[in-house]
Image: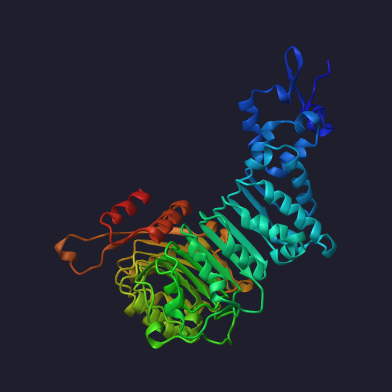
């Protein structure tokens, strides 16, 4: 007696376009289950696993699926990244029922998708996006690439007005745009906006008050990110004292945006986390005139600062920084980087560098970094024989309790596990304060210093807890404690790393909490 196979069941359902029924086989024969007859809660749960594109495909299989109200729940987060036609399909699907637009809370149009739009189709796509934004009145997050062309092609500025008229946005990201995106950000009616990211590419400078000066009405703005605003904001000489501060911002990102660091401190005086990366991209620039008094000003204390070492040559940081990331540290920036560490007195230091004789930063670092607890570094190692000098430099830190060394080497060790254990033991003997060491090896021949730590490097790293057993017998006095190098899992190692990146070392009990992570 023939029986149905799983493939037969599949072919009887969605594969042939009959989404309304599925076949199930039991001892008494096949039982037909209609999709629309499922309990609403069960159906809602099943559909919750679908992304919007998959839910859209399901809705096209039959009339019953097209009318399922549970599909509307998949509209909460919509990412359009497959093709330009997907924008038009989404508009048609969204506007087919009056109730659907209110489900959309987050909408992202991928930058790569907008780059692929033919010039002749920009107006059609821009108008479709305007139709979408005019109806999604509960939208909270919006992101779109290549906004310059989209805004300019939209008939009667509909797209710009639709963006400005939104009142519920909490996060707005506009990339590759001209002065229009600055105008959208400055004029938005979403007064509860919390995160704003602008990536600009216009040449003619706009007055400071045309953008930053108009953001003061956004009282709940906490995250601000500007990129490629180099030479795009006009800041009159001697006008720094006239700028109104934006007090709510605590996370600030300025990339390729030559707003002077002292001016950024005046504009966003309550910032706690900053990223400032400019000089590496623009080696020749016209500096904004800043008085000597202003040049020495800054935030009192920062939780975290990512400041490219080359920027320190132009704008030395004058704040205490608990977690300092110097980006790529070239030998020519050693003195500025050392001065920054001495002034900021960080607990955690991150950077990336190549082991070479010209990089004097490591020779004196232990002298000035007296409060450093955790060293998180990426190392490009061209010559194996220079590693011993690097290890020697790590010996003198008086407060260091953990180090993570992501070593990108030109010469891979024959036994990476044994090599990592040996390095951990060497570090433990050189520095009696160290408790945790993480070491990762990767092929450095195709990597650069500025490459981030990739997932495969993290997952391939090895972590160790260093335990020391003191010798109590009087006859052994003066002999150093027995060092035990105990391997711990990578997962536990990275929990230690995450904890050290966030903990307040002034808070009592942090050492006990750290020990509890390891168990």
- 485 or 300, which is in the foreground? 300
Q: Residue at x 57, y 72 (%)?
A: 210
**Image position of 15 (left or right of 397):** right
Q: Position of residue 180 (x, y in %)?
A: 66, 67
Q: Residue at x 73, y 37 (%)?
A: 97
> Residue 173 appears in which quarter of the rendering?
bottom right
Residue sticking out furthest to the top:
28
Residue 93 in view in this figure: yes
> Residue 432 appears in which quarter of the rendering?
bottom left
Q: Quadrant of the N terminus?
A: top right
> Residue 196 appears in which quarter of the rendering?
bottom right
Q: Position of residue 519 (x, y in %)?
A: 35, 48
Q: Position of residue 63 (x, y in %)?
A: 80, 30
**Image position of 427 (left or right of 202):** left
- 47 or 345, which is in the foreground? 47
Q: Position of residue 397 (x, y in %)?
A: 33, 73
Is 455 placed above or below 25 here?
A: below
Q: Residue at x 37, y 85 (%)?
A: 293
- 167 or 446, which is in the foreground? 167
């Amino acid at each position: 007696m023939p029986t149905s196979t799983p493939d037969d069941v599949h072919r009887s359902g969605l594969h042939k376009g009959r989404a309304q029924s599925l076949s199930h086989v039991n001892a008494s024969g096949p039982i037909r289950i209609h999709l629309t007859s499922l309990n609403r809660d069960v159906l809602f749960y099943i559909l919750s696993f679908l992304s919007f594109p998959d839910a859209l495909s399901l809705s096209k299989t039959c009339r019953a699926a097209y009318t399922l109200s549970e599909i509307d729940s998949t509209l909460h987060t919509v990412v359009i990244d497959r093709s330009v036609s997907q924008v038009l399909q989404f508009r048609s699907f969204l506007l087919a029922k009056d109730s659907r637009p209110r489900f959309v809370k987050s909408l992202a149009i991928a930058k790569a998708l907008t780059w692929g739009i033919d010039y002749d189709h920009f107006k059609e796509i821009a108008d479709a996006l305007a139709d979408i934004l005019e109806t999604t009145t509960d939208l909270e997050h919006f992101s779109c690439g290549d906004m310059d062309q989209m805004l300019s092609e939209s008939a009667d500025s509909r797209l710009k007005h639709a963006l400005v008229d939104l009142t519920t946005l909490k996060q707005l990201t506009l990339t590759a745009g001209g002065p229009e995106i600055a105008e959208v950000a400055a004029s938005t009616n979403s007064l509860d906006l919390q995160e704003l990211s602008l990536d600009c590419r216009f040449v003619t400078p706009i007055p400071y008050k045309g953008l930053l000066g108009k953001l003061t009405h956004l009282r709940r703005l906490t995250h601000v990110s500007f990129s490629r605003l180099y030479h795009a904001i006009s800041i009159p000489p001697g006008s720094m004292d006239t700028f109104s501060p934006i007090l709510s911002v605590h996370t600030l990102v300025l990339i390729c945006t030559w707003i002077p660091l002292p001016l950024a401190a005046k504009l966003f005086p309550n910032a706690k986390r900053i990223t400032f990366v400019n000089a590496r991209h623009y080696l020749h620039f016209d500096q904004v005139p800043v008085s000597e008094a202003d040049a020495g000003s800054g935030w009192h204390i920062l939780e975290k600062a990512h400041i490219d070492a080359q920027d320190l040559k132009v704008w030395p940081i004058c704040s205490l920084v608990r977690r300092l990331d110097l980006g790529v540290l070239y030998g020519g920036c050693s003195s500025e980087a050392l001065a920054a560490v001495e002034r900021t007195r960080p607990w955690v230091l991150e950077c990336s560098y190549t082991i070479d004789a010209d990089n004097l930063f490591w020779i004196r670092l232990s002298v000035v970094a007296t409060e450093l607890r955790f060293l998180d570094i990426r190392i490009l190692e061209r010559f194996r024989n220079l590693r011993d000098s690097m290890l020697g430099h790590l010996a003198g830190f008086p407060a260091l309790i953990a180090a993570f060394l992501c070593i990108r080497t030109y010469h891979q060790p024959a036994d990476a596990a044994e090599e990592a254990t040996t390095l951990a033991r060497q570090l433990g003997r050189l520095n009696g304060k160290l408790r945790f060491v993480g070491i990762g090896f990767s092929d450095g021949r195709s990597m650069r210093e500025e490459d981030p730590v990739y997932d495969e490097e993290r997952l391939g790293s090895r972590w160790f807890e260093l335990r020391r057993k003191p010798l109590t017998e009087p006859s052994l006095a003066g002999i150093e404690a027995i060092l035990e190098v105990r391997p711990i899992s990578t997962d536990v190692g990275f929990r230690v790393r995450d904890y050290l990146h966030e903990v307040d070392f002034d808070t009592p009990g942090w050492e006990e909490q750290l020990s509890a992570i390891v168990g």
